[in-house]
Amino acid sequence: DTEVTQTPKHLVMGMTNKKSLKCEQHMGHRAMYWYKQKAKKPPELMFVYSYEKLSINESVPSRFSPECPNSSLLNLHLHALQPEDSALYLCASSPRTASNEKLFFGSGTQLSVL
Amino acid sequence: GQSLEQPSEVTAVEGAIVQINCTYQTSGFYGLSWYQQHDGGAPTFLSYNALDGLEETGRFSSFLSRSDSYGYLLLQELQMKDSASYFCAVRANYGGSQGNLIFGKGTKLSVKP
């Protein structure tokens, strides 16, 4: 199994809603990442988890809250988002953070904030 | 600072060869990665060069010159399905992202019949 699975594929939410994005991998990878990608732009790093511990928080607003319940799962909790947060949210994994030249990406969640 | 430069768009015809260049400015360089992303899809890893020279994988090859801070992705026998965005990437060497991949702005390749 070389897949990273993300759910949901599409999400529409209001600015007062609370929602969560989910990511799962069963490759035994110990590094997991959240990237944000706006249309026609490159992916931008948001968070990095290494061995289930948050190692990088790239100055992301607190309305985004990551969680890594175990080595296979990664969540991104969303609360009080703004319309400018509409984007494709990509989860990725790699065996370790030191071997991150090859990232395995999920297909993403296309988020629209109304 | 750190920067990656690649052309924003490239157009080629089926069966042709196309080269997508990437120049980078960074210290503490580890290597250059390439990713492909179709519209609406996930980025997928294509290649990684840590040492100078050409790496070949089927129709795709990737080249690196560390002394010139330059690399390229070469796509041969172009097919319509190669129409996608192609990103070069290096490890960030500063700030909160240090050690993690940062991506160039991407090159949109359009393959025409």
Image: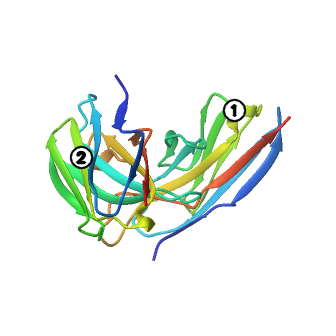
Answer above or below: position of A68 versus B15: below
Query: Residue at left 28%, top 65%?
Result: A80
- Say whether marks 2 and 1 touch (CB < 8 Å): no
For disc 1, the marked residue is B81
Split into 4 quadrants, where in the image is the N terminus of chain B?
bottom left
Indicate the amino acid at tag 1. Answer: Lys
Instruction: Locate residue B95, reporting x and y percent.
Output: 32, 72
Observer-nearest residue: A110 or B46?
A: A110
Left or right for A36, reference A67: right
Callout 2 crowding tier (Cα within 10 Å): few <14, some 14–19, many ≥20: some
Instruction: Locate residue B65, reporting x and y percent.
Output: 59, 56
The image's mark for residue A43 is: none
Residue A30 showing in the rendered view: no
Query: Residue at left 47%, top 69%?
Result: B26
Q: Quadrant of residue A7?
A: top left
Q: Quadrant of residue A23?
A: top left
Whole-angstrom CA distance, mark 2 to mark 1, is: 32 Å
For disc 2, the marked residue is A75
